[in-house]
C-alpha cells in the first residue's frame, strides 16, 4: 500500500506520523468520537447484562445447580470482556498494534484470546449439559453433578489459557506476509482457530442437531391430547437453539475465517474491516446474557428483584423464582 492508501485506511482515531508511527490526535474527529461512544455503550451493556446473570445465580439459592454454574462461568468470562477487553481495545486498537507491536499489544492480545476462548468453550460445555438433560433425562442428575460442573469449568479455563498463550507466543498474524509466511505463523493461524472456534462450533452444532432430533422423537411419542402443549414447547426450544447457533456463528465465524486466510492473501484488506470483525466477535459477549438469560423465566424474575432493590432491603435468597 502506498502512503496515500495507508493514510486513508488507518483507524479514524489515529493519525500516521511520518508514515511510520500512529499517534492519537489532540483534536479527534467526529467519527472517532462516535466510534468510542458506540463501543462504550456496547461495553456498558456487556457489563450490566453479565453482572445481572452473575448476581442472580450467586444470590438466589434456587439457582445453585450445575447448569447455572456453567452459565455463571460464561457470564464471568463475558463480564471480563466488557471490563477489560473493550476499554483496552478502545484505547489501543488492532490497527495500532499492526503498525507498532509492543508489550502492551501482546498482553492485550493474550487476555483477549483467553477470554474469547473461554467464552466459546463455556458455550460448548453448556451444550453438552443440555444434551445430557434432554437426551438422557433419567441419568442426568447423577451424571452432571456440581462436582462435574466444577471440573468442566476448571478444564475450560485451563485449556483456554494454554491454547491462547500458545497461539500468541507462536506469533499469529493479523496481517499479510510480505513474502512468505513462517511455518509457526501459518500453523498458529490455522490450528488456533481450529481448536478455539471450528472444533467447538462443530461439536455444538452436532449436539444441537441431536437434541432437536430427540425432541422430535419425544414429541411423536406423546399422546395426541397433549400435542398442542408439546408443540408450543418444541417450537420455543427450536427457536432458542436456532438463535443460539445463529448468533454464535454470525459473531464468530467471519473473524476466525479472516485469521486463517489473511496471512495468505495477496493484499491486506482495509484495517477498518479487520477492526469491525474483531468487534463483532467481542459483541457475542454482550449477546450471551440475552440468549442464555432472558430466555429463562427465573432470570426475568431475578432481574425484577435485583433491579427493584429488594435484595438490599431483605433476605430474598430463598425466594422461589417462577
Image (cartoon, rainbow, N blue to C red):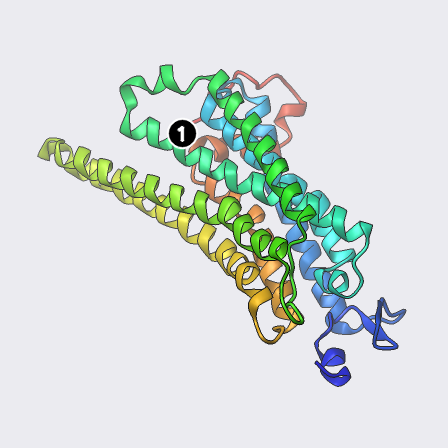
How packed is label 1: few (under 14 Cα within 10 Å), some, or many (20 or more)?
some
Which residue carries the number 1 mark? 129
- Determine the image quadrant of residue 232: top left
Q: Secondary structure at mark 1?
A: helix
Residue placed most toward the observer, 225 or 274 = 274
User: Residue at 62% across / 65% down in the picture?
Assistant: 274
Can residue 53 be spotted in the picture?
A: no
User: Residue at 55% across / 62% down in the picture?
Assistant: 258
- In the displayed structure, would residue 46 be above or below residue 2? above
Quadrant occupied by the C terminus: top left
Quadrant occupied by the N terminus: bottom right
Can residue 296 be spotted in the picture?
A: yes
Number of numbered discs on residues: 1
Q: Position of residue 74 (x, y in %)?
A: 55, 36
Q: Position of residue 69 (x, y in %)?
A: 52, 26
Q: Is residue 301 left or right of residue 234?
A: right
User: Residue at 74% across / 57% down in the picture?
Assistant: 90
Q: Position of residue 27 (x, y in %)?
A: 87, 71
Residue placed most toward the observer, 207 or 38 = 207
- In the displayed structure, would residue 251 be above or below residue 302? below
Q: Position of residue 278 (x, y in %)?
A: 61, 58
Residue placed most toward the observer, 97 or 173 = 173
Residue placed most toward the observer, 267 or 92 = 267
- In the displayed structure, would residue 13 be above or below residue 294? below
User: Residue at 57% across / 46% down in the picture?
Assistant: 285
Amino acid at each position: 500500500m502506498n502512503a496515500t492508501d495507508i493514510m486513508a485506511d488507518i483507524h479514524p482515531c489515529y493519525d500516521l506520523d511520518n508514515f511510520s508511527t500512529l499517534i492519537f490526535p489532540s483534536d479527534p474527529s467526529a467519527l472517532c468520537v462516535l466510534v468510542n461512544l458506540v463501543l462504550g455503550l456496547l461495553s456498558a451493556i456487556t457489563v450490566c447484562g453479565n453482572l445481572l446473570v452473575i448476581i442472580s445465580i450467586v444470590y438466589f439459592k434456587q439457582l445453585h445447580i450445575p447448569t447455572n454454574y456453567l452459565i455463571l462461568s460464561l457470564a464471568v468470562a463475558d463480564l471480563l470482556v466488557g471490563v477489560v477487553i473493550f476499554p483496552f481495545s478502545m484505547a489501543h486498537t488492532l490497527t495500532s498494534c499492526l503498525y507498532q507491536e509492543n508489550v502492551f499489544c501482546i498482553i492485550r492480545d493474550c487476555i483477549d484470546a483467553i477470554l474469547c476462548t473461554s467464552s466459546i468453550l463455556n458455550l460448548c460445555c453448556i451444550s453438552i449439559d443440555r444434551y445430557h438433560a434432554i437426551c438422557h433425562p433419567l441419568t442426568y442428575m447423577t451424571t452432571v453433578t456440581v462436582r462435574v460442573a466444577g471440573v468442566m469449568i476448571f478444564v475450560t479455563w485451563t485449556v483456554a489459557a494454554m491454547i491462547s498463550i500458545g497461539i500468541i507466543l507462536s506469533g499469529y498474524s493479523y496481517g499479510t506476509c510480505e513474502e512468505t509466511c513462517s511455518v509457526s505463523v501459518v500453523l498458529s493461524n490455522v490450528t488456533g482457530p481450529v481448536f478455539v472456534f471450528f472444533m467447538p462450533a462443530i461439536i455444538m452444532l452436532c449436539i444441537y442437531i441431536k437434541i432437536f432430533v430427540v425432541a422430535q422423537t419425544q414429541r411423536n411419542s406423546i399422546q395426541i391430547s397433549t400435542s398442542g402443549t408439546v408443540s408450543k414447547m418444541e417450537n420455543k426450544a427450536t427457536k432458542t437453539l436456532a438463535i443460539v447457533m445463529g448468533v454464535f456463528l454470525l459473531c464468530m465465524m467471519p473473524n476466525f475465517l479472516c485469521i486463517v486466510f489473511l496471512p495468505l492473501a495477496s493484499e491486506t484488506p482495509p484495517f477498518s474491516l479487520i477492526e469491525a470483525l474483531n468487534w463483532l466477535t467481542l459483541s457475542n459477549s454482550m449477546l450471551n446474557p440475552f440468549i442464555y438469560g432472558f430466555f429463562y423465566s427465573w432470570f426475568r424474575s431475578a432481574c425484577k428483584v435485583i433491579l427493584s432493590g429488594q435484595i438490599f432491603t431483605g433476605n430474598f435468597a430463598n425466594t422461589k423464582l417462577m
